Amino acid sequence: MEIRFLKARLGSGDDEMFVAGAFDDGRLAGMAGSYREKGLKSRHKGRVWGVYVTPGRRGKGVGRKMLQMLLERGRRITGLEQILLSATTTQEAAIILYRALGFKTFGCEPRTLKIGGRYVNEEYMMRRVERG
């Protein structure tokens, strides 16, 4: 896919569903998506998905900036009260970042993934939406 089409698609969602992209010299360096739950009883929740930073840009603040942007956009969604995400427990740097941004663990699913003969757990985290 050409970079101009990719740039056009990033951030092209509505106010309640969007993707953030980070670019470095015209190349995609990271992405993170967010959406609001659609159900009548769950519309107070948003979710972060697909967080990825290219190996060469990790540890340089790219993930933090994208997540801060998602949190800021979440603040502007009327009725959104909390944002949830999850990460495999092997993603230690991601979990450290999420905690630094105010996410708190509320559960852990054991043996979420089976890779070869090895199991990986998933940590579930939540952060309340802060209003100005």
Image (cartoon, rainbow, N blue to C red):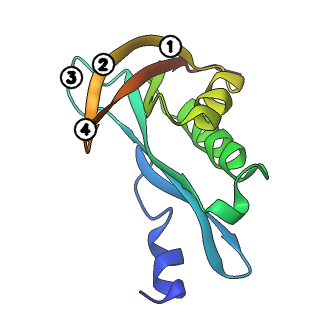
- Most foreground residue, 67 or 107: 107
Given this view, does label 4 or label 1 mark the residue nearer the observer? 4
Which of the 4 image quadrants contains residue 124? top left
Q: Which residue is mark 3?
A: 40
Given this view, does label 3 or label 4 mark the residue nearer the observer? 4
Q: Position of residue 111 (x, y in %)?
A: 27, 25
Q: For the residues marked 4 and 1, what is the alpha-carbon distance in whole angstroms?
A: 27 Å
Is residue 33 at all visible to an observer of this figure?
Answer: no
Q: Earlier in the sequence, mark 3 or mark 1?
A: 3
Q: Which residue is depicted at the point 24% across and 34% down?
A: 38
Q: Which residue is depicted at the point 71% across and 22% down?
A: 132
Task: Tell me the SS state at disc 2.
Answer: strand
How packed mark 4 is, by other alpha carbons closer than 10 Å (few <14, some 14-19, many 20 or more), is few
Q: Position of residue 11 (x, y in %)?
A: 50, 62
- Residue that lies at the very extreme toward the top in this rendered image: 106
Vertical relation: 19 (above or below) 118: below
Question: Given the image, on which type of amino acid does mark 1 rest?
Answer: Thr
Q: Earlier in the sequence, mark 4 or mark 2?
A: 2
Q: Which residue is mark 4?
A: 117
Vertical relation: 23 (above or below) 92: below
Q: For the residues marked 3 and 1, what is the alpha-carbon distance in whole angstroms?
A: 25 Å
Given this view, does label 2 or label 3 mark the residue nearer the observer? 2
Q: Which residue is depicted at the point 45% across and 53% down?
A: 18
- Residue that lies at the very extreme toward the right in this rendered image: 60
Task: Tell me the SS state at disc 1.
Answer: strand
Question: Given the image, on which type of amino acid does mark 2 rest?
Answer: Pro
Q: Is residue 88 left or right of residue 62?
A: left
Q: Earlier in the sequence, mark 4 or mark 1?
A: 1
Q: Which residue is mark 2?
A: 110
Which of the 4 image quadrants contains residue 45? top left
Q: For the residues marked 1 and 2, what is the alpha-carbon distance in whole angstroms?
A: 14 Å
Q: Which residue is mark 1?
A: 105
